[in-house]
């Protein structure tokens, strides 16, 4: 029998939140510096902010969640039963 995994604690939640903030700041700084130095045009910077930056944040969240132990699979799921009955 497979032993159930325990959910990560408050330290993992803090690390996840800090990691997402750091990833967001690094991504925004990279786009800003690239635009400021003239490496990318204004249109490409806008495209990066509107379309690529959210995908980058999703990828960062996936990496952080797997690294911190938030990843789950079908064996971690338990059935949920609702006990409140209305008459």
Image (cartoon, helix red, strand yellow):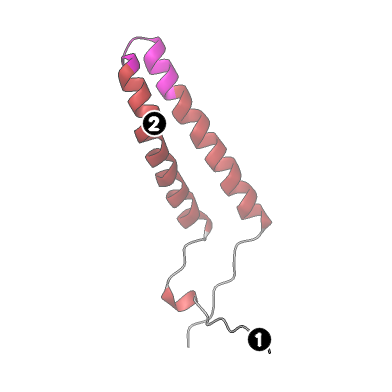
| Identity of the residue drawn at 46% across and 67% down | 72
Q: Secondary structure at mark 2?
A: helix
Dominant secondary structure, magenta:
helix
Name the image quarter holding residue 36: top left
Find residue 18 and report its image quarter. Answer: top right
Query: Where residue 43 sits in the image (x, y, percent)?
Result: 31, 18
Q: Which mark is residue 50?
A: 2
Pointer 1 residue: 83
Q: Position of residue 13 (x, y in %)?
A: 62, 53
| Furthest residue toward front | 87
Give above or below for 71 relative to 48: below
User: How busy is the neighbourhood of tag 1: few (under 14 within 10 Å), some, or many (20 plus)?
Assistant: few
Q: Quadrant of the C terminus?
A: bottom right
Asked if marks 1 and 2 touch (Cβ < 8 Å), the reply is no
Judge whether residue 35 is colored magenta: yes
Crowding near pointer 2: few (<14 within 10 Å), some, many (20+)?
A: few
Residue 2 on image: x %, y %:
48, 83
Q: Is residue 58 above or below residue 3?
A: above
Badge nearest the viewer, 1 or 2: 1
Disc nearer the start of the sequence (1/2): 2
Q: Which residues are magenta?
A: 30-42
Q: What whole-number distance in Å separates the C-alpha atoms at marks 1 and 2? A: 45 Å
Instruction: Judge from the rendering whether residue 47 lies leftward or rightward of residue 2; answer left or right.
Output: left
């Amino acid at each position: 029998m497979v032993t159930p995994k325990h959910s990560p604690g408050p330290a993992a939640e803090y690390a996840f939140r800090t990691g997402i903030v750091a990833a967001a700041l690094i991504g925004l700084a990279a786009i800003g510096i690239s635009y400021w130095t003239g490496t990318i045009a204004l249109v490409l910077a806008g495209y990066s902010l509107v379309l690529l930056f959210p995908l980058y944040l999703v990828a960062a969240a996936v990496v952080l969640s797997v690294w911190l132990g938030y990843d789950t699979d079908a064996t971690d799921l338990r059935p949920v039963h609702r006990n409140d009955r209305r008459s």
